[in-house]
Amino acid sequence: MALFSQDALNPGVRKREVFGWAMYDFANSGYTTVVLTAVFAAYFVGGIAQKAEWATFAWTLALSISYAIVILTMPSIGAYADLRAAKKRLLMLFTIGCVLATAALALTPRFSGVSGVAVAMVLIIISNVFFTYGESLTAAFLPELAKPDALGKVSGWGWGFGYFGGMLSLGLSLGYVLWAQSQGLPASHFVPVTMLITATIYGLAAVVTFRLLGERAVPNPNALQTSGLKASLKQLQNTFRQARRYKDFMWLMACAVFYQGGVAVAITLAAIYAEAVIGFKQQETMVLIFVLNFAAAGGAFAFGYWQDRIGHKLALGITLVGWIATCVIAAAATTKGHFWWAATIAGLCMGSSQSAGRALAGMFAPPKQLAEFYGLWTFAIRLASIIGPLSYGVITWATGGNQRLAILSTAGLFAMGLVLLRFVDVARGRAAASGAM
């Protein structure tokens, strides 16, 4: 626990609480790494959907539906969590939902044809909705734990620690996959086991979070006298009425809609691109994603310290330039070696861009509305998660499977995010958040 420096924390916050908070990033990273990126995504396209022309589109459609559900519900859930001081209770509920749905993915090989595709899509929608709810709520704890001038550092601790959790889930899964393949067992046998491994690690690691991380928010007495839904919607209405006060937060959300769309493409389609276009085999893809996570952990840790020194806006801008380079290199890659370069740059940019975005959102969030503002932040990044992967899927389908053109078009999302970032004034945004106290 020496990693967590006490001078970066708010008064009264103990290092064990930050460790517990970071353990949730450790817990849930296996879901994105194994389910959405390295294993189940490729299995869905190649195994369940049998490499049909619409397979990639079906995968992105399932994710888009899940994100649409989150967009419609997360802001009010965030407002409810603030008003009722229920972040931790809701986090526990959503974690249980994601763990159970992830474990249920192990049943998908028992179905075939259209029913198999439908079952897999429904379970992905359910698990990803609960995962995203949990991701948003755990982010809302960040400003309670870290000092304003150390948000990047502490956010980097969480993201970096999280990638090691992803590597643990992926490493154990890879070990089992290699053993199963040596025994001549098909993907329909070893993919379900990787889902169970991921769900188990998620559940066990999250227990540490629930033991160590406390609820610091205080319930709003007025909210307790009305229904939770009515009070939440009223609070959201008040926030939108005052949107002009929080215009830098709004600019940041607009920026996130574009650049996070590109990040979502990398997370959800990297394995599909590596196998379908570059020619990676499944075990090679898992090794690739493992190394990508290692690079992402290093990027999150290093940029966490660096962004507090040079500024979160500049740090985020640098990573967006790196993402543009990644897309261009990946689109031009003709060998596995060339693609490794793109993957390494993507790994370094992934941890740092997500860490910087989360820290900036925390700077612009009023102290009494943390879960609500992170709910709005989640609204933006999940809208991005619809736009990015779905546009990739549509371009791939419309061009008869041309994924190179699809990945090259993703560079445009990062470029637009870079343009919108120019309008974010960090000092003005922090002043607006402080004025709402």
Image: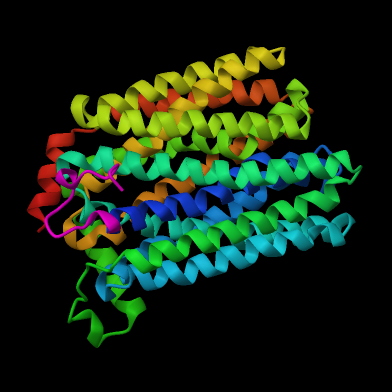
Residue 11 covered by magenta stretch: yes
**For the view shown, which residue lies furthest in the right direction?**
184
Q: Position of residue 411 (x, y in %)?
A: 51, 22
Whether residue 165 is situated above or below residue 423 in the rendered picture: below
Whether residue 357 is situated above or below residue 217 in the rendered picture: above
Q: Position of residue 325 (x, y in %)?
A: 49, 16
Name the image quarter holding the C terminus.
Answer: bottom left
Residue 116 covered by magenta stretch: no
For this view, does 75 lie left or right of residue 130?
left
For this view, does 250 lie left or right of residue 350?
left
Q: Position of residue 116 (x, y in %)?
A: 83, 58
Instruction: Using the rendered image of the protein, determine whether residue 308 is visible from the camera's viewpoint.
Output: yes
Q: Residue at x 89, y 55 (%)?
A: 113
**For the view shown, which residue lies furthest in the front direction?**
2
Q: Quadrant of residue 118?
A: bottom right
Q: Which residues are magenta?
A: 1-16
Q: Quadrant of residue 226?
A: bottom left
Q: Residue at x 55, y 27 (%)?
A: 410
For this view, does 289 lie left or right of residue 419?
right
| Pick the front one: 196 or 3 | 3
